[in-house]
Amino acid sequence: MKMKKSSVLGLAAAGVLLAALSVPVSARIAGWLYGQTLRVADTEGRGGTVINTLGVGDAYIQGDLEVAGQQFSAAPATQVIGAASTIAADACGGLKRISATADRTTDTTATFTAPAAGNAGCCMLVVNVDTVDTIYLDSNTAFPLTNVASAALGPKGSINVCSDGTYWQHTAWTEY
């Protein structure tokens, strides 16, 4: 069978594309995806199979990857900040609600869960949902603030923080 030159080139390009799609692609598991359950469904929509809970590391995807629906994690329960409390890094990629029973200052050495390789890339929007009390986030070695001793989050105040594995950095801060 004789094929036109354009058909041969088209088939060659399709072969290269198929070869490229069959090579495993590495994806870093971080942020909101960490700790989530991976479900795989077939293209006929016959349901999904629980594969495993994802941890920090690499995942390999071979073939097509389609993400459908809303992608978010439910916010954890509001953390009540006591005197010298540490804010838990349990809302990576989402909303971290905090409140207090009186004006409070966080721990002077660990404002947030200690930065480490396991929470590198964790970003949280921390919001004081208290209606009366101010929460002071202490500036320290692991949470360095410039020219202030603490970040004051009054009622409805918020701060966006991210861990690089060594420090917690703030990217935006709103004081009410």
Image: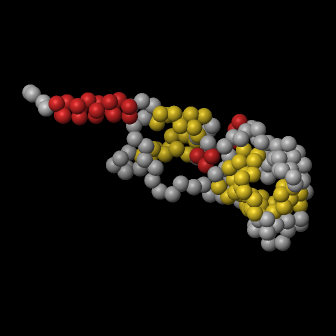
**Residue 91 location, x and y as percent?**
68, 52
Q: Is residue 23 above or below residue 136?
A: above
Q: Is residue 13 above or below residue 146?
A: above
Image quadrant occupied by the N terminus: top left
**Residue 171 location, x and y as percent?**
72, 53
- The front one of 90 and 123 is 123
- The front one of 73 and 138 is 138
Q: Quadrant of residue 109?
A: top right
**Residue 144 location, x and y as percent?**
83, 47
Q: Is residue 35 above or below residue 60?
A: below
Counting labels gives 0
**Residue 78 location, x and y as percent?**
74, 61
- The front one of 109 and 40 is 109
Residue at 76% from the left image edge and 38% from the top image edge: 166
Residue at 79% from the left image edge and 52% from the top image edge: 87
How is the rendered protein coloured? secondary structure
Farthest residue to the bottom: give it.
131
The answer to whether one can see residue 64 in this image is yes
Farthest residue to the front: give it.
147
- On the picture, is 20 further left or further right than 117? left
Residue at 79% from the left image edge and 65% from the top image edge: 175
Residue at 37% from the left image edge and 49% from the top image edge: 46
Image quadrant occupied by the C terminus: bottom right
- On the picture, is 134 further left or further right than 49? right
